[in-house]
Image: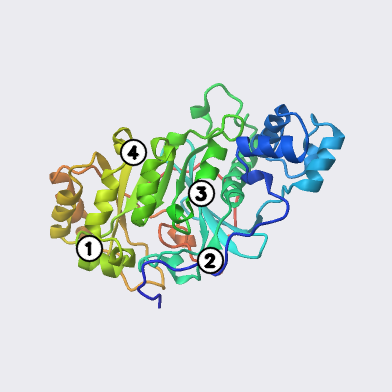
Amino acid sequence: MVALVPIRKPARGIPRPLRPNLRGLTRIQLETFVTSKLGAPRFRADQIFEWVHRHRASDVHEMTNLPKPLRSLIDEHADLRRLERHGDFVARDGTRKLRLRTLDGHYIESVLIPNDQRGFTLCVSSQVGCSMTCRFCATASLTFERSLAAWEIVDQIEQAQDLLEQASQREGRDHGRSDDPESWPYRLSNVVYMGMGEPLHNFIPVKASVEIVTDPKGAAITARRITISTSGLVPAIERFSRDPLSAQVGLAVSLNATTDDVRDDVMPINLKWPLLALLNAVRALPDARRRDLTFEYVLLSEVNDFEDDAHRLADLVREFDCHINVIPFNPHPHAPYKRPSSNRVRRFMDVAKRRGLRVYLRTPRGDDIGAACGQLALEGESGQAPAAPLEEGRTT
């Protein structure tokens, strides 16, 4: 059983390779590398950046508009390796879970979810395991090995883009080349940092990864379609609020209880920073970004799903212009909780709506392959369907 401590220390730090992986360099960092390390003109950095992130080149020799001597220098001084795809599972509802292996032998998972409309949402991981000990989350049952480097986060997104492009090509579609991106059925429309790990506990690599994937010369994902989650790491929320990143992306705060007693037990981070401290930190968000604030509320049967909880929730968050995502607990063998009945869920939702909250019920996605919210725990392949050709899905 996971000890009830607020934050765990990593077993090791992020690997510091002798040769930087170019996937983890922002365009500004790449310009410095190209001019100082390679002795090449600054404009070459833009070309390399496009090859790495727009074309997702895995070999420097694919960069045909670069002179051969420069390609040789890149090969000598930089790395282009990617995460190894080690598992690929597809759920009945079209959700797809990717299990990826890091260069030092650890495993992480990311989840590709078909949206109600066109496009897909990708849930990415930020750590190997997790530094938090939330008792409802399967990832907390794992050892916290280390945080991920920026390139390892970026490559999860680019691996998903590879899958979507392959699916588009199988259907003979002109993926990503029409004038209206909203019409692409296999586009990556949203990215949420809600996979394995606490994103704000790995702030610098997470911030760098956002800068890379939103760069117009790269994947060009719209920043407003990116959401970073947190379990309530107050100093990190305060840091996020002061950083320009907070004016670009959304923030999702895992609340999951309306009293300190319950939250202490469900989310031990509350032992260090209770509800009042958490909400004070949230108040520091830039006013212009309050509309992008989301509170996540995992419903645990007969723990935090009473009608009184719905009333207290309304009292706690009524000052914020926010959304509330209500998520019925997704069962797994690592937690002592149960999913509430449909009647309990309905009563909770009804009270919250009557109190004026903008609440949205999040139905399980990919729970048959251990890919739903709170289920990522690197379980074995038993009972998981083999990967099938990716198809555009619809939410029921």
The residue type indicated by label 3 comes to: Ile
Q: Is residue 213 visible?
A: yes
Q: Secondary structure at mark 1?
A: loop
Decide which of tag 2 and tag 4 comes sooner along the chain.
4
Q: Nearer the viewer, residue 74 or 376?
A: 74
Q: In this image, 126 relative to 105: left or right? A: left
Decide which of tag 1 and tag 3 comes sooner along the chain.
3
Q: In this image, 262 relative to 389: left or right? A: left
The residue type indicated by label 2 comes to: Leu
Q: Name the residue beneath numbered marker 3.
A: 204
C-alpha gap between disc 3 and disc 2: 25 Å
Q: Nearer the viewer, mark 1 or mark 4?
A: 4
Give the percent coordinates (x, y) of residue 155: 61, 48
Q: Nearer the viewer, mark 2 or mark 4?
A: 4
Decide which of tag 2 and tag 1 comes sooner along the chain.
1
Q: Nearer the viewer, mark 4 or mark 3?
A: 3
Q: Is residue 281 above or below residue 180?
A: below
Residue under the point 49% across and 54% down: 202
Disc marking residue 304: 1
Give the percent coordinates (x, y) of residue 267: 32, 65
Q: Counting other residues with Cα less than 10 Å from the Cα at mark 1, is it few (<14), some (14-19), or many (20 or more)? A: many
Q: Secondary structure at mark 3?
A: helix
Q: Counting other residues with Cα less than 10 Å from the Cα at mark 2, is it few (<14), some (14-19), or many (20 or more)? A: some
Q: Is residue 87 visible?
A: no
C-alpha gap between disc 4 and disc 3: 21 Å
C-alpha gap between disc 2 and disc 1: 27 Å
Give the quadrant of the N terminus: bottom left
Disc marking residue 66: none
Q: Name the residue beneath numbered marker 2.
A: 378
Q: Name the residue beneath numbered marker 4.
A: 292
The residue type indicated by label 1 comes to: Asn
